[in-house]
Image (cartoon, coloured by chain):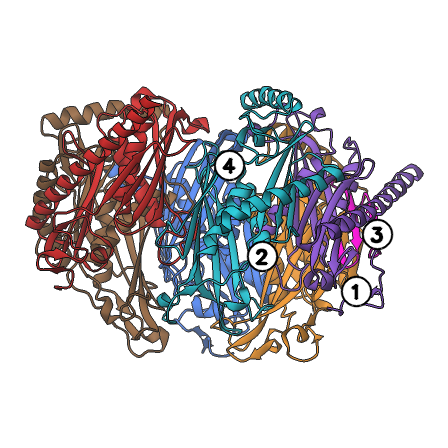
Chain colours: A cyan, B orange, C brown, D purple, E blue, F red
Amino acid sequence: MDIPEVKRISAVKKDYLIKLAKQGKRADGREFDEYRKITIERNIIKKAEGSARVKIGNTMVLAGIKLDIGEPYPDSPEEGAMSTSVELPPLASPDFEPGPPKPDAIEIARVIDRGIRESKYIKLDKLVVEPGEKVWIVFIDIHVLDYDGNLFDAGSLAASAALQNAVIPNERFGLGDNEPLPVGSPPISCTFAKFGNAIVVDPGLEEEQVAEARFTVALDENGDIRAMQKGLKGRFTVEEIKNNINRAQIHAKNIRKLLEG
Amino acid sequence: MDIPEVKRISAVKKDYLIKLAKQGKRADGREFDEYRKITIERNIIKKAEGSARVKIGNTMVLAGIKLDIGEPYPDSPEEGAMSTSVELPPLASPDFEPGPPKPDAIEIARVIDRGIRESKYIKLDKLVVEPGEKVWIVFIDIHVLDYDGNLFDAGSLAASAALQNAVIPNERFGLGDNEPLPVGSPPISCTFAKFGNAIVVDPGLEEEQVAEARFTVALDENGDIRAMQKGLKGRFTVEEIKNNINRAQIHAKNIRKLLEG
Amino acid sequence: MDIPEVKRISAVKKDYLIKLAKQGKRADGREFDEYRKITIERNIIKKAEGSARVKIGNTMVLAGIKLDIGEPYPDSPEEGAMSTSVELPPLASPDFEPGPPKPDAIEIARVIDRGIRESKYIKLDKLVVEPGEKVWIVFIDIHVLDYDGNLFDAGSLAASAALQNAVIPNERFGLGDNEPLPVGSPPISCTFAKFGNAIVVDPGLEEEQVAEARFTVALDENGDIRAMQKGLKGRFTVEEIKNNINRAQIHAKNIRKLLEG
Amino acid sequence: MGELIKDGLRIDGRKPDELRPIKIEAGVLYRADGSAYVEWGGNKVLAAVYGPRELLPKHMQDPTKAVVNARYNMASFSVEDRKRPGPDRRSIEISKVTSEALESVIFTELFPRAVIDINIEILDAEAGTRCAGITAAAVALADAGIPMRDIPAACAAGKVDGQVVLDLRKEEDQEGEADLPIAIAPRTEEILLLQMDGHLTYKEFEEALELAIKGSKYVSKLQKEALRRKYKKVEEE
Amino acid sequence: MGELIKDGLRIDGRKPDELRPIKIEAGVLYRADGSAYVEWGGNKVLAAVYGPRELLPKHMQDPTKAVVNARYNMASFSVEDRKRPGPDRRSIEISKVTSEALESVIFTELFPRAVIDINIEILDAEAGTRCAGITAAAVALADAGIPMRDIPAACAAGKVDGQVVLDLRKEEDQEGEADLPIAIAPRTEEILLLQMDGHLTYKEFEEALELAIKGSKYVSKLQKEALRRKYKKVEEE
Amino acid sequence: MGELIKDGLRIDGRKPDELRPIKIEAGVLYRADGSAYVEWGGNKVLAAVYGPRELLPKHMQDPTKAVVNARYNMASFSVEDRKRPGPDRRSIEISKVTSEALESVIFTELFPRAVIDINIEILDAEAGTRCAGITAAAVALADAGIPMRDIPAACAAGKVDGQVVLDLRKEEDQEGEADLPIAIAPRTEEILLLQMDGHLTYKEFEEALELAIKGSKYVSKLQKEALRRKYKKVEEE
């Protein structure tokens, strides 16, 4: 929760960003519809079944994939399972505290999870070891390393990239040779922040701090919608929501090229 | 823990209630040996195997029964198991806080549990699925909805009523048709509060707040004692305890009629 | 964490103890290389598989051994397991608080555990019930009863003495007659505290409170090193560490006689 | 496919744009400052509001406005398999988006350093509990006299057997293709809450959003009727 | 039936109204402000008192009196199957009723804003630990010099093989028909703690209560002897 | 025996007194006040320093000096079998001895009431993570401009196949006979951290300690080079 001094600074910052936005500008010189530079590095963690480090501007996120064998859910005995979590360690920001995941981290993890799950990115039906008894459980752990805004998109992209090159560790479990994790086409997440009347894509930290409302949409390869999440205490009109999705469809194509390139 | 202002109000209230009691009166006009109006509604939660909502005056409590299959305790391989818990959600009182059960809630749950268990109300020996391997576990969850005093009796009554019409969910577990949960005769709980020299039955919220001592007894159909609990930092004489039990035997008969009627 | 007043007292106490130490003296009249009186009582807890109460001066520690059957670790299917924990209950000191183990308690437990484990005091390879399936798990619970300094040595000694006379509770598990827990030669732990330029063995409470650095070494019957731990924010020179070990080798012989005598 | 909609009707006989039966009652609890009870299909939901009151400990206070703290909780007996008491990750997320949706209409700046606690208890659950919960909470806030620019109303649309429908019931939620719960400020039709999972083309989304808004506005009517009944009853007493 | 009492004697040879051997020692710990050790049959119990001292954090303080905070804890090795460290529901309930029973005799109003911490550790358990714990705690309070109107004493009665007996041992507790632990203020015979589970007719209850009070009064004698021995020892030193 | 060292060389071809390849980079994070990245054999470790800043809540403050609070954490994917997030007993112990080792060189008395937070994240683990973590943390402290009397450096020695060797890799750690991680103040060669488990004769210990100090001093050289590269880069910008 904010303390008074932070509040005051934030009010000044907000006025400044809104004033800039009225002129169609952002504090770091970007267009409303411009992402910061995105870089993806893969396979950097040896101990993980898959991994990727994604930078969006100064935000840096590391996703690691681990597989384990467990029981299937009773209502899907012929499918593997997946679990997504987001860690916001105090390493990544002066505002992060140690301890169990806060609501922020849980929300990010669950939205990313829905994007992956609903786009059927991981082919869970191919992760059965013994039907009804033993299936692979895919753990997607997203570790934030440097927090400068937009963890929804950075986390989602890191998770997608890490899954893209992950393996099933058959060897470690005495089940033969390792094989690639069967995946389809990844979801692409695109996040907007609204302050004043401006709605910008890929909000940086300061923009997030002053944002009244947030909107994330995860799109599949056809530009169809697989997950959405409105956040914060602000409001969107129906038109704004529709615009966001239309804008996201363009961004998603570009990010998809980066990911699949 | 009380804060100063609350303390002061409470001291005034206490003086007032004690003064009234010296004249044989209670703040809401009841006799010392008068319960508030009791109502019982059953089968109101579809997802529960049994349920009942009990009101005692403005106090409202909802008990839900769920059954699951688990392993028997090693020392009773031929018996099902039961577990009683009480939730005091912040919905029910400005003084309740979220979080794991506090000592208050645990005490109420354990006293209610002992009444049910010791009167052998649930026929645990008839809840065996595979001897020594699989038995039914009966979960009695008591959810307080509106707290205006005397949760011991309201909770116990709600639990008894909910069990009375509960079913064994054989269908959900592929074990044939549902059947009624085998029960015997329910315990009836009766609670007294002592302040000054007065001892009143069915204490309301204000009476509980000023009470020095509390006494609960659970009686079976013969008026025999199955569980007792003295609470709070006050003292009872032996005569007072005996009187409480004698008074309870009369109340219990009336409440039993309501329950079985 | 210290509060100001405690700090101030502690600074005065520290000056005093350092001044004394310069004259080669300790506050309780001991030599630098003198333990307080050590007593060991065994087999005092009937419910435990083994137990011992150790006093070092006014410090009193009770270790209890319980055995249970569980699965072996995947990487040692032919070995039993052991687990060491230290409880610092509020009974033993005005500064101990209830709740899960604090870092202090965890450090003590882990150092004692390493001494026992690395000296192969418990013959874990003889604790197999069914290879790869069921093994004995030895729980070493060290309960501090009175805290007047040097829990590392008191706890280690109590654990060793309790293990020395422990039994495998075959009867309780329907596995035939009880038999002695197979043990080898115990580790002996020896702890030093450094304040000013003095390094004393077996620090008392006040010495611990002013100590800048702490050093513990666990020695086997040959005087070989099985575990070491430097603690606190002070520093040791290489010579000081070596001296500590040499001094410990003499103390350990004496303590070993007490334990095995 | 083809199992959930037959001859244009859904498994419970509803038309695609038809809500389940909804019953709303305001002012049902004695202790709470405001409260409401909602039955919505097989859902039974109770909401209670406490506050505005001083937020403690003090270092949590916001000197510029009230903190809005909604807590969504499922009773352990409200679901098929008993739920362990206490918040799980799903409840924590719903509590967060619910808090945000409700805060967006409350004049929080009137109550600096205060907290408004909103407690939502799901007593019986059958798909759509978050919308039922927000709907109940909004009535409880009004019943508590909390000043709001509008009374939020919530409703979900979704896709079943390839068709956009209103207000999914359990089987439709589990076997359907998409769920889109929203909450709106009925007067301006602004979106306060929007979540979605499943698969919708952009066109389907437009259709579903329109339907969900229509549903929310109908819910809004029921909320206001419930509040009117309550005021009337109070006046009569 | 008929297994636990033979020829009028219980399985350990005791008569129905006979206590197990009890040994009480006061002032056994160095650090605590007051302490006591009790062996009672197979039970071994240690109690320590700290305080009165300032209660922190301050917002927990009661400006009119001291808070009495008893904590009953079983060592993990004190029972047949190792107990996981930390409080379980049973320990929490016993801690609560113990705190209340002891507070009822302490002149708490003499120490506003303070806390009196009472720590009870069950080191070896064999039925009746709560009575042994209260008995030890009461001696520890006296040893700490806490002003009390009386020194509480505790004892249980019960029913075994249809007969009312004093002070159940393990087998009697597990296979018997009722257990009635009480604590009293010996001077006035007022009841400070009373719990019961099992099956007692009203007449049996009267009989059991009388027996438990008799037992408690004998325990009280042992407590006072232990305190006298302690004072004598201190004087001699 | 005889499996881990052949013809005087270790399984990865190293000589007994040879370190694994080590790469250190200072100032790698944007948000942190100071940071460092260390690759050490198969280990990948990131450290970030925040502070000195006011310690909250206030009652935790030390009016005479800064509190040094190091937190060692393993990412869940950094080990063979996924680690559940959150501190386990091993992490808690390492955090404690790391805090102590680092505090011993920091001029904490310059920052009363403050806290210096040091966060160490193990991203990829392959034996020796605590030494890699301390090494990274020390560089991060220097990068943050925290005044220190010396920059700590860490390294382990151990015993494998009966021979004292430097810097154990995974197989050597698991199947070897002893591990002796230390941290030193390189200028004075004072010991800031020392832990050991396994089996060493006194002579072997002397040899291992000497080797570990030699290793630490080499690590110290790499740390200083990394810091120089960072300063140079900053100057060039």
Other residues around mark 1 within 10 Å, as few (<14) / some (14–19) / many (≥20): few
- Between label 1 and label 3, give the one nearer the viewer: 3
Q: CA distance from mark 1 to mark 4?
A: 43 Å
Kind of element beneath mark 3: strand
Q: Quadrant of residue B129?
A: bottom right
Chain letter for the residue marked with disc 3 in the picture:
D
Residue occupied by mark 1: B257
Residue occupied by mark 4: E67
| Amino acid of disc 2 | Arg
Other residues around mark 4 within 10 Å, as few (<14) / some (14–19) / many (≥20): many
| Label pair 2/4, CB-CB below 8 angstroms | no
Residue D72 versus residue A16 in the image, above or below: below
Q: CA distance from mark 1 to mark 3?
A: 33 Å
| Amino acid of disc 4 | Val
Q: CA distance from mark 2 to mark 1?
A: 55 Å
Rendered-image quadrant of the C terminus of chain F: top left
Q: CA distance from mark 4 to mark 3?
A: 48 Å
User: How far from the left and from the top, in percent, is residue C35?
Assistant: 14, 42
| Label pair 2/3, CB-CB below 8 angstroms | no
Q: Residue at x 8, y 59 (%)?
A: F7
Question: Which contiguous range is marked in magenta?
Answer: D18-45
Residue occupied by mark 3: D23
Chain letter for the residue marked with disc 4 in the picture:
E
In front here: E193 or F45?
Answer: F45
Mark 2 on the same chain as mark 1: no
User: What label sits on residue A117 in the rendered view?
Assistant: 2
| Label pair 1/4, CB-CB below 8 angstroms | no
- Between label 2 and label 3, give the one nearer the viewer: 2
Chain letter for the residue marked with disc 2 in the picture:
A
- Between label 2 and label 4, give the one nearer the viewer: 2
Other residues around mark 2 within 10 Å, as few (<14) / some (14–19) / many (≥20): many
In front here: C79 or C17?
Answer: C79
